[in-house]
Image (cartoon, rainbow, N blue to C red):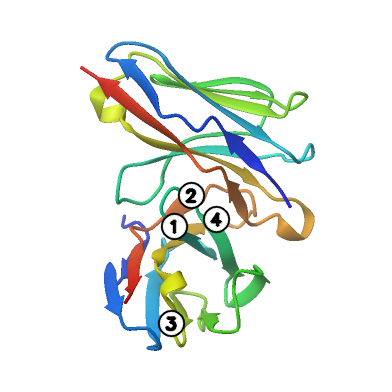
Amino acid sequence: DTGVSQDPRHKITKRGQNVTFRCDPISEHNRLYWYRQTLGQGPEFLTYFQNEAQLEKSRLLSDRFSAERPKGSFSTLEIQRTEQGDSAMYLCASSGRHPTDTQYFGPGTRLTVL
Amino acid sequence: QKEVEQNSGPLSVPEGAIASLNCTYSDRGSQSFFWYRQYSGKSPELIMSIYSNGDKEDGRFTAQLNKASQYVSLLIRDSQPSDSATYLCAVNGRGSTLGRLYFGRGTQLTVWP
């Protein structure tokens, strides 16, 4: 049984560049979540999917951020025109059918914007 | 806006002691509560979930929930140096935000030999 996987694990980019992260959830999970975590803070919710439908987006998810889950399996999170304030750990989690099922986190993608 | 507050720490205990971690939440209607452990540079790892008032034990860990006081705690018995980490309290939203977790800032625990 494999857990949640994320790729890449680390990304360094220059301000203004676009970046894309991928998340593969636990295979039987139909809910997939994205969070962002900065140093000294708890994770902050960005968005989540049930199957391929994006059901909720946080106000943190500006128009530079877009997330997709086209076939209800893996998901991508794209950040356009990156800013230094986007530097953070981007965490993906997945869970079962019920909204309050336990969320299991992937290893995260650490983004550094220079 | 939901708030989840944790004693900020850092908390330092000797090996073998009991570590007590506390969390309060603002939404009286919250129903699901989680404790995650996070080692430095790593992602959160589930320690315990609790849904009903009272205690829930799993090995050296005990979660306690008091919905009337809007309070959830985690006790770690026989603390080990390997327990040194940041502990995150998380609470599910309600209604349209049911799917999301609200996290506290975490309490940093150090267990010294």
The residue furthest left is B113
Question: Which three-letter amino acid code belongs to the residue tagged 3?
Answer: Thr
Question: Which three-letter amino acid code belongs to the residue tagged 2?
Answer: Gln
Tag 1 residue: A38
Say left or right for A19 vs A77: left
Badge 4: how crowded within 10 Å, few (<14), some, or many (20+)?
Answer: some
Q: Are marks 2 and 1 on the same chain?
A: yes
Q: Nearest to the eye among marks 3 and 4: give it.
A: 3
Badge 2: how crowded within 10 Å, few (<14), some, or many (20+)?
Answer: few
Badge 1: how crowded within 10 Å, few (<14), some, or many (20+)?
Answer: some
User: How far across and down, in percent of the image, does residue A61 sit?
Assistant: 59, 73
User: How far across and down, in percent of the image, does residue A100 sit?
Assistant: 63, 49
Question: Along the line of sight, which residue is nearer the eye, A72 or A49?
Answer: A49
Which of the labelled discs sits on residue A82, or is there none?
3
Q: Contact (CB < 8 A) between labels 2 and 1?
A: yes
Question: Along the line of sight, which residue is nearer the eye, B40 or A68?
Answer: B40
Residue at 76% from the left image edge and 41% from the top image edge: B27
Q: Secondary structure at mark 1?
A: loop
Q: Contact (CB < 8 A) between labels 4 and 1?
A: no
Tag 2 residue: A41
User: How far across and down, in percent of the image, does residue B54 sit?
Assistant: 65, 19
Who comes first in sequence, dot 1 or dot 3?
A: 1
Q: What chain letter is assigned to the residue under label 2?
A: A
